[in-house]
Amino acid sequence: MPDVEGARRIYELMVLTAWADGKVEPNEALTVREIVAGFPDIGNKSELSRAVKKRIDEKGFEEALRETAAAVADRADRELAFRCCARVLNAGEMDTEDLEALAALQELFALSGEDVKRLMANLEG
C-alpha cells in the first residue's frame, strides 16, 4: 500500500488518465472512487481533481502526465499506479487516447511488455 504522498500521486494519475480522451465517463469516476477508498486519506479529492484538470488545461495532457508520473519513484507504486489507471480506463469505453495514455505510462515507468501483461490481468479487482 502506498504512503499518503504516493496515494495522492496515484489518485492524480487516475484522474489524469480518465481525462485522456477529453472527458471523464461516469464509470471511470466511480472506479476511481472505489480504488481510492482503499488508500490512506489523501485529503480533499475534489480539490486534487480540480488541480489536475487545471494542470491539463495549462500544460496539456502529455506534459501533465509526464510531470505527475515522474513524481512516482517507487517501483511498487509505479506498478500499482499503472494497474489503477488501467482499471479506470477499462471501466469506460477504451479508445485510442486511452490506449496512448497507458502506453505513455508504460514508457514513463519503464515497464516491459511482460510487466504490462501481468498488471493488466484481471483488471476488475
Image: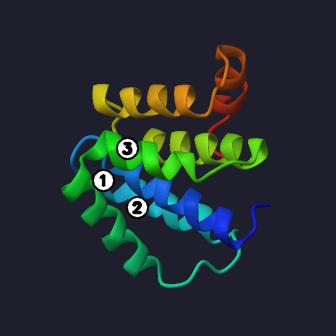
Tag 2 near tag 3, CB within 8 Å: no
Q: Residue 50 location in percent, x, y?
A: 31, 72
Q: Secondary structure beneath disc 3?
A: loop
The residue type indicated by label 3 comes to: Gly
Whole-number angstrom distance, CA of label 1 to CA of label 2: 6 Å
Q: Secondary structure beneath disc 2?
A: helix
Going 45% across and 29% down the picture, which residue do you hit?
104
Please indicate whether residue 43 sits to the left or right of residue 53 in the image: right
Please indicate whether residue 116 sits to the left or right of residue 57 in the image: right
Q: Earlier in the sequence, mark 2 or mark 3?
A: 2
Crowding near the residue tagged with mark 1, few <14, some 14–19, many ≥20 C-alpha atoms within 10 Å: some
Observer-nearest of 61 and 70: 70
The residue type indicated by label 1 comes to: Glu
* Residue identifier under label 1: 25
Whole-number angstrom distance, CA of label 1 to CA of label 3: 6 Å
Q: Which mark is residue 92?
A: 3
Observer-nearest of 5 and 26: 5
In the rendered image, the quadrant that contains the N terminus is bottom right
Q: Earlier in the sequence, mark 1 or mark 3?
A: 1
Tag 1 near tag 3, CB within 8 Å: yes
Q: Secondary structure beneath disc 1?
A: loop
Going 50% across and 57% down the picture, which residue do you hit?
31
* Residue identifier under label 2: 29
Going 30% across and 60% down the picture, which residue do you hit?
55
Tag 1 near tag 2, CB within 8 Å: yes
Crowding near the residue tagged with mark 2, few <14, some 14–19, many ≥20 C-alpha atoms within 10 Å: some
Whole-number angstrom distance, CA of label 2 to CA of label 3: 9 Å
User: Is 21 drawn above or below residue 114 in the view shown?
Assistant: below
Q: Which mark is residue 14?
A: none
Q: Residue 39 location in percent, x, y?
A: 69, 69
